Image (tube, rainbow, N blue to C red):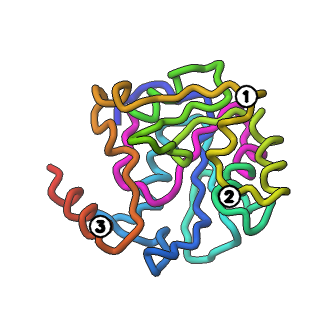
Amino acid sequence: MSERALVNATGVLVAGGKSRRMGRDKRFLKVGGKSVFDRTLSLLMGTFVETVVVLAEPIDSLEVRGCRVVYDVIPNAGSLGGLYTGLLAASQPRIFAVACDMPFLEPEVIRFMAYFDNTADVVVAKLQGQFQPMHAMYSKRCAEFLKAMAERHDLKIQALYRTEALRVAVVGANDLSSLGGGLRSFQNINTPDDLTLADSAISDTP
């Protein structure tokens, strides 16, 4: 990774998922000999001035060094609850929220999103018609709206982007295609087949 200045935002690793389709805890999946959790945590710590890990509950076998660990303020609210908790915990006015199942995260893509529009409350990619809420920038202004969504059991983060009081900047495939690894940064692991393909791709990388 290049020795560039750290981004003045908080990197938030949302790592409390149920991993239903995978059938086992994604946090311990290994790709290229290293867990996806460790890969993501290292990348965030090397990119942002602060990194926070959000968990649903304590887990002894998960090793976290050099950053704060916080636990869901709103239980059973999925990724939306993790995002809300990360916003509350962050010392910076903006966060980059990411899930722990994305082995191809690219620092160049993350930095692009962080600097894409500093005035926006949300900077989110829309690829093939789908928003990517767990690879996106959020301002602390989003917290009150996420809390209200959780209270009414509306747990789809994408609904936040329709909030008229928030300024949302949407990044498209054309914006990302020229960046190194651009679109691949958003690829995640949902099934054992996804894991096999990801492991092969990373193992084959020089």
Q: Name the amino acid, label 2.
A: Val
Which is nearer the eye, 126 or 97? 126
Q: Quadrant of the N terminus?
A: top left
Residues marked 1 and 3 touching at CB (< 8 Å): no
Which residue has dot 1 on it? Answer: 166
Q: Residue at x 42, y 55 (%)?
A: 102
Q: Name the amino acid, label 3.
A: Gly
Residue numbers of the magenta segment: 85-108
| Nearer-N-terminus badge (3/2) | 3
Q: Secondary structure at mark 3?
A: loop
Q: Residue 10: x and y, percent? A: 63, 38
Query: Is 104 included in the stretch rendered in magenta?
Result: yes
Which residue has dot 3 on it? Answer: 33
Q: Residue at x 31, y 66 (%)?
A: 194
Q: Quick check: 188 above or below 193?
A: above
Q: Residue 136: x and y, percent? A: 55, 39
Q: Secondary structure at mark 2?
A: strand
